[in-house]
Image: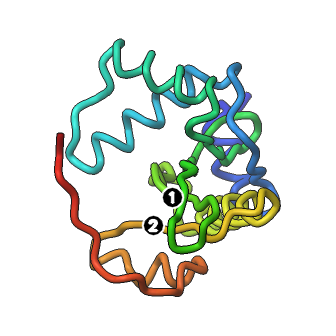
């Protein structure tokens, strides 16, 4: 009998075999692993127990929404949307973040499905826009996913 990873790799050959839906509490352990894989890939520390609890509290309180891509019940990709208020549009807007797909599942249309789900959710919930901050090397990818309005450069002050 084949293990689930092998089955998912075979099934994921077609975009139709991947489903995208909102993260549910039953997927918490899979999500934690995916989040820590994401952090490791970008050179950050894994989430501590305290940070994991703060993240789950934010999810439960609706301050951040995660979409997950699943293959045969296994979570293989994710993205998040955080709602904020725009004084320019005098409306809510979304910030797209936490975008990650397991390396074995890349180049199979999952990125497009995740971005589309986040964009549709924003449209259905009357958000004025969905923005993403990215490194220059990722600009072309995000433009191909529908983030095609340049808004300038983003700076941050870490508190």
Q: What residue is disc 1 on?
A: 95
Label 2 crowd bin: few (<14), some (14–19), many (20+), radius 10 Å: some
Residue located 62% across and 59% down the image: 92
Q: How many marks?
A: 2
Q: Nearer the viewer, residue 58 or 111?
A: 58
Left or right: residue 21 versus residue 28 is right
- Are the residues at dot 2 and dot 1 in contact (C-beta closer than 8 Å)? yes
The correct choice, above or below, for 150 with respect to 35 in the image is: below
Residue located 67% across and 59% down the image: 118
Task: Point out the image quarter for the C terminus.
Answer: top left
Residue located 29% across and 48% down the image: 41
Q: Which image quadrant is residue 51 in? A: top left
Task: List x then y, in percent, for residue 115.
Answer: 63, 64
The reply to whether residue 14 is in sight is no
Q: Which image quadrant is residue 40 in? A: top left
Distance of label 2 from label 1 (alpha carbons): 6 Å
Residue located 43% across and 86% down the image: 150
Q: Earlier in the sequence, mark 2 or mark 1?
A: 1
Q: Residue furthest left?
A: 158
Q: What residue is disc 2 on?
A: 132
Task: List x then y, in percent, for residue 4.
Answer: 67, 33
Task: List x then y, in percent, for residue 122.
Answer: 71, 61
């Amino acid at each position: 009998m084949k293990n689930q990873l092998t089955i998912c790799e075979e099934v994921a050959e077609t975009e139709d075999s991947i489903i995208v839906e909102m993260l549910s509490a039953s997927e918490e352990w899979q999500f934690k692993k995916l989040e820590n894989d994401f952090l490791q890939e970008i050179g950050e520390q894994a989430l501590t127990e305290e940070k994991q609890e703060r993240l789950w509290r934010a999810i439960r309180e609706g301050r951040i929404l995660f979409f997950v891509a699943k293959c045969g019940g296994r979570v293989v990709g994710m993205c998040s949307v955080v709602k904020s208020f725009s004084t320019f549009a005098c409306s809510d807007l979304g910030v797209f973040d936490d975008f990650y797909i397991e390396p074995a599942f890349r180049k199979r249309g999952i990125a497009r499905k995740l971005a589309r789900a986040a964009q549709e959710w924003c449209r259905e919930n009357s958000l004025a826009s969905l923005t993403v901050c990215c490194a220059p090397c990722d600009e072309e990818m995000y433009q191909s996913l529908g983030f095609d309005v340049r808004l300038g450069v983003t700076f941050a002050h870490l508190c």
